[in-house]
Amino acid sequence: DVQLVESGGGLVKPGGSLTLSCAASGFTFSGFYMNWARQAPGKGLEWVSSISSSSTYMYSADSVKGRFTISRDNTKNLLFLHMNSLRADDTAVYYCARDRRGYGSYYFDYWGQGTLVTVSS
Amino acid sequence: QSALTQPPSASGSPGQSVTISCTGTSSDVGGYNFVSWYQHHPGKAPKLLIFEVNKRPSGVPDRFSGSKSANTASLTVSGLQAEDEAEYFCSSYAGSNNVVFGGGTKLTVL
């Protein structure tokens, strides 16, 4: 079975940094685009960032460009989100999700349960 | 990128049908047949219900169906069951490798 397990969330002060991880299993990780999305308290989902299967292409939402960097380690089946200059409005549950981009479509077919990031002094 | 517009809430009695709308623009929903819908129970992983406007992954009951007209996509849940009570999100490809989501609709089964 496909499994995605996020970790690394926690409480961080404004301006601080945090790195989230997503451990993937049950599929050939190196064959898929991967994403991070987030949901702030009381708000809808927001796509954050995508990375191609071999890390050639990376895309990010305008709201995180220049502050967040997505990366992956295909030897360890891990996806990362490196978050810098964190702001209060980055407070959210962060989800990793597998993407069907690269197979001719655009949708997220598997998601993790999320990890909570709280930015507060 | 602007979020897609969904009604914040919807409701129906067991056995009834409910339709949830998702309105975007010609740059996202109206421009591509890459609309997807997700079901999210609190504390759990979101689950894919519909992809490419009206296709169901294996294992998703045919009570869930999707459609699109111009810039508005819709998810219909027929034969409502108690376990359908959840939040539902739509999503669309928006060009230039961007994806946009809707604000979510909380479905209550009365």
Image (tube, grey):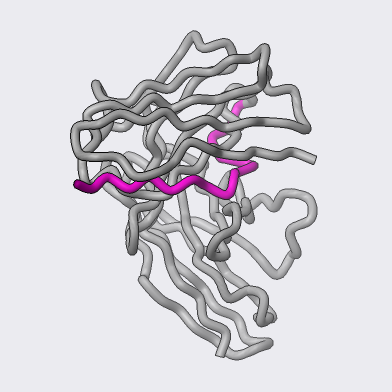
**x then y, percent, for residue B75:** 54, 64
Query: What residue sits 59% from the left and 17% below the top?
Result: A53
**x then y, percent, for residue B107:** 50, 75
Instruction: Pick the quarter of the image with the N terminus of chain B.
Output: top left
**x then y, percent, for residue B87:** 50, 66
**x then y, percent, for residue A41:** 34, 59
| First to last magenta residue range | A104-121
Query: What residue sits 62% from the left and 39% below the top?
Result: A5
Residue A35 vertical position relative to residue B6 in the rendered view, above or below:
above
Question: Which of the two residues, A36 or B33, is positioned nearer the viewer here?
Answer: A36
Whether B13 is among the magenta residues is no
The mark tally for this picture is: 0
Question: Which of the two residues, B109 or B64, is positioned nearer the viewer here?
Answer: B109
Question: Which of the two residues, A18 or B22, is positioned nearer the viewer here?
Answer: A18
Residue B87 vertical position relative to residue B30 in the rendered view, above or below:
below
Instruction: Pick the quarter of the image with the C terminus of chain B.
Output: bottom right
Query: What residue sits 30% from the left and 28% below the top?
Result: A17
Q: Is residue A80 visible?
A: yes
